Image (tube, rainbow, N blue to C red):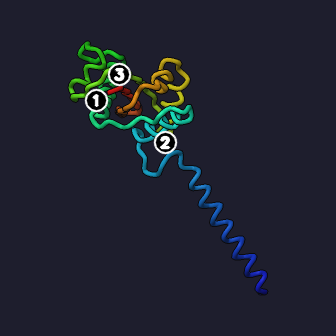
Amino acid sequence: MSAKAVQTMKIKALFITLAAFLAILFSVPTPAGADMVDEIIYYTNKERVSRNLRPLKVDRRLSQAAQRRAKELASNFSHTRPNGRDWFTVCKEFRVSFSEALENIAFNNHDRKVAARVFMSNWMKSPGHRDNILQSNMTRIGVGVYKQGKDNYAVQLFMVE
């Protein structure tokens, strides 16, 4: 085999390897290893940044409150908590202080691989939910996801300190 033929084979092998790598890279919808909560935060900030808004910072206690709310949705899908109180009372339970707070809730029964994208797509199609995501004065976010059977419940909590 000539040197030129060997070089051509090496170049073809390199292109095939590169094509396979790119196919794997671009088939991953979000950063590798991200769970549904991370994906929702990622897509939320992507929407905000694309409109020249500041990305939201994740707040640990607000995230804990959102997780509690997501679990509550499985028994009472409402902005009112199962105990009959308003949704924002969960923030007090986790010592979250805020001057303003907003809540988005949703559920779907999609596969885990697409559920976060479906949540975000539906929220962005809904004027009220989209407005919450794009509120320019919001500074913090907490996200909770709860799975019961095939149902996924998600909560986004937004706040201004």
CA distance separating discs 2 and 1:
24 Å
Q: Say which quarter of the image contains residue 63.
A: top left
Residue 44 appears in view: yes
- Measuring 33% from the left and 28% from the top, which residue is drawn there? 70
Give the side of residue 127 with respect to residue 79, left or right: right
Q: Earlier in the sequence, mark 3 or mark 2?
A: 3
Q: Position of residue 139 (x, y in %)?
A: 39, 31
- Measuring 36% from the left and 37% from the top, which residue is drawn there? 58
As shown in the figure, which amino acid type bears the numbered disc 3?
Answer: Ala
The residue that label 1 is drawn on is 65
As shown in the figure, which amino acid type bears the numbered disc 2?
Answer: Lys
Q: Earlier in the sequence, mark 3 or mark 1?
A: 1
Residue 152 marker? none
Q: Earlier in the sequence, mark 2 or mark 1?
A: 1
Q: Secondary structure at mark 3?
A: strand
- Measuring 67% from the left and 66% from the top, which residue is drawn there? 16
Q: Position of residue 75 (x, y in %)?
A: 31, 22
Q: Tell which tag, 3 or 1, sits nearer the viewer.
A: 3
Q: Is residue 7 above or below residue 53?
A: below
The residue that label 3 is drawn on is 101
Q: Quadrant of the C terminus?
A: top left
Q: Tell which tag, 2 or 1, sits nearer the viewer.
A: 1
Q: Secondary structure at mark 2?
A: helix
Q: Say which quarter of the image contains residue 67.
A: top left
The residue that label 2 is drawn on is 113
Residue 118 appears in view: no
Give the side of residue 67 with respect to residue 117, left or right: left
Q: Say which quarter of the image contains residue 10.
A: bottom right
